[in-house]
């Protein structure tokens, strides 16, 4: 989404544009998404729900999204009506149709799209950037001299070494809930050029998936296997303990991140009959549908008519029965009597009371990383303070937050921009759309 939007915005103001695509097909994680281009309705809601993110960039996303949705529609992207949901607003698009419309407009406007080409390095030249690209199939290297470059490589969730280094999570335990080509190419190339990184490198966005055999082989169905109702569940790790306030976050992304740091990044979501029938999934269906899909896919979902039987069957699955019993009793007592509870439960304070009771085995999954490159509000990549170079740009018309020196000609968009979402979710496609449009337009202003 970010790369396509950046190309379209640059073409609109007369730039010559080449889109370098690592995969053999275009679309990235947009192609795997549900197509909901969503963010919070106002800035105060963003800060309330995602207070550790960058406020200037969050404000840009919220304020710019309505106009940029209209811009997308003008380019032939078909979208549904405005929807109000999860404290925000958005429109739904068909990912396939959106990609076809945007790519078609790029080509019709004279832009080039080169698949099977991965970014190798960036170098600073005289009044230009040198972009070195390697064919992902042929291995051939190409050198491109350009006035500016926009990095839209989608984060580093596909790189096991970076996941371990920056997230501190065992990559073998964590499932990949996105395209496999986002391996930090833009991030590493920019770091080597002297770019500054943001806070939030230890944070990521994703949803827990039902733990089924050979789950990676079913990654094309990761949305169907996502257990979005975690905020309403009692989440247990394999030791039988609660490990987080399940209700924190825009959706279930904070709980999923906490799950990634439990033994083997696995656990169980426990719900009762009322929750399974009344809590809604993003598609509007009751969450029992997600539980049934998990079971149909091969997950060993546990159901029982009583809590005692649920505990016994969890023990058969390897959880210590006495610990699970204590955890559930403490949870119930705290919610009924107001006794202290750790971890706390700020919202959705319901006990497991109505049969049948379900325990769904889950495994943490990653969709995109939250930390990344530091940029100003023109999406210019900022240089580390310790780096000295004449090739910097400072715009005196911006305020103090933008006065760090920028690497001349280097821009970023989408998930390569760090700290928009952080321990919370501001909207991945919305962020990609807004930052991509800005980066494309601003990068085109440097052409001769």
Image (tube, rainbow, N blue to C red):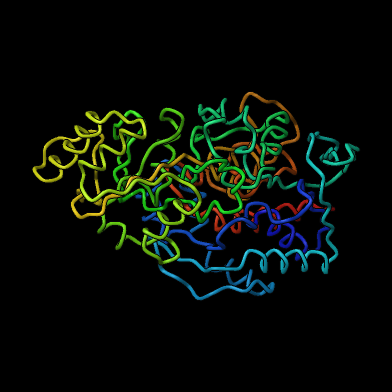
The quarter of the displayed image where residue 188 is located:
top right
Give x and y (percent) for residue 46: 40, 53
Residue 55 vs 391, above or below: the answer is: below
The structure residue drawn at horizontal position 50% and vertical position 34%, both measured from the top left corner, is 199
Q: Is residue 207 left or right of residue 150?
A: left
Examine the rendered structure and indicate whether residue 134 appears above or below residue 448.
above
Is residue 121 shown above or below 81? above
Residue situated furthest left in the rendering? 337
Residue 358 drawn at (x, y percent):
31, 49
Q: Is residue 353 left or right of residue 382?
A: left
Q: Quadrant of the N terminus?
A: bottom right
Out of 397 and 241, give the one closest to the viewer: 241
Question: Which residue does the image show at 20% across and 51% down from the upper left?
Answer: 350
Residue 280 in view of the camera: yes
| Observer-nearest of 81 and 389 | 81
Place of residue 189 in the rendered image (x, y in percent of width and height, measured from the top left): 73, 34
**What residue is shown at x 23% (from left), y 42% (from top)?**
309
- The front one of 128 and 297 is 297
Q: Nearer the viewer, residue 186 or 160?
A: 160
State the residue at coordinates (27%, 48%).
304
Counting labels gives 0
Residue 130 visible in the displayed image: no
Res 25 quadrant in image: bottom right
Horizontal side of residue 345 vs 361, given as left or right: left
Q: Residue 299 location in percent, x, y? A: 46, 46
């Amino acid at each position: 989404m970010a790369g396509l939007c950046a190309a379209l915005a640059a073409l609109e103001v007369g730039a010559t544009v080449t889109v370098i695509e690592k995969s053999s097909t275009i679309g990235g994680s947009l192609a795997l998404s549900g197509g909901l281009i969503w963010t919070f309705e106002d800035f105060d809601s963003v800060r309330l729900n995602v207070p550790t993110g960058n406020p200037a960039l969050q404000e840009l996303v919220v304020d710019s999204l309505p106009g940029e949705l209209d811009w997308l529609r003008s380019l032939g992207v078909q979208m549904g009506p405005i929807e109000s949901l999860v404290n925000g607003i958005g429109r739904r698009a068909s990912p396939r149709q959106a990609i076809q419309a945007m790519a078609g407009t790029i080509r019709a406007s004279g832009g080039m799209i080169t698949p099977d080409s991965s970014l190798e390095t960036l170098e600073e030249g005289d009044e230009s950037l040198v972009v070195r690209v390697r064919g992902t199939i042929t291995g051939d290297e190409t050198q491109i001299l350009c006035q500016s470059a926009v990095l839209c490589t989608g984060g580093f969730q596909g790189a096991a070494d970076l996941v371990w280094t920056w997230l501190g999570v065992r990559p073998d335990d964590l499932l990949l809930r996105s395209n496999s080509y986002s391996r930090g190419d833009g991030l590493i190339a920019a770091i080597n050029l002297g770019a500054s990184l943001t806070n939030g490198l230890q944070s990521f966005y994703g949803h827990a998936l039902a733990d089924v055999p050979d789950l990676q082989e079913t990654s094309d169905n990761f949305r169907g296997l996502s257990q979005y109702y975690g905020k309403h569940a009692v989440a247990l790790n394999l030791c039988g303990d609660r490990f987080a306030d399940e209700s924190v976050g825009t959706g279930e992304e904070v709980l999923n991140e906490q799950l990634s740091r439990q033994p083997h990044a696995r656990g169980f979501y426990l719900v009762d009959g009322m929750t399974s029938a009344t809590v809604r999934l993003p598609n509007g269906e009751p969450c029992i549908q997600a539980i049934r899909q998990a079971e149909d896919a091969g997950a060993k979902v546990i159901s029982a008519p009583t809590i005692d039987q649920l505990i016994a069957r969890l023990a058969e699955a390897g959880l210590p029965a006495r610990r699970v019993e204590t955890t559930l009793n403490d949870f119930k007592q705290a919610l009924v009597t107001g006794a202290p509870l750790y971890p706390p439960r700020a919202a959705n304070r319901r006990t497991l009371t109505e049969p049948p009771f379900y325990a769904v085995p889950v495994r943490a999954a990653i969709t995109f990383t939250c930390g990344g490159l530091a940029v100003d509000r023109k999406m210019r990549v900022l240089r580390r303070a310790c780096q000295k170079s004449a090739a910097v740009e400072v715009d005196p018309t911006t305020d103090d937050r933008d006065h760090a020196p920028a690497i001349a000609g280097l821009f970023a968009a989408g998930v390569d921009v760090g700290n928009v979402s952080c321990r919370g979710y501001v909207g991945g496609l919305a962020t990609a759309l807004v930052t991509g449009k800005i980066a494309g337009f601003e990068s085109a202003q440097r052409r001769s």
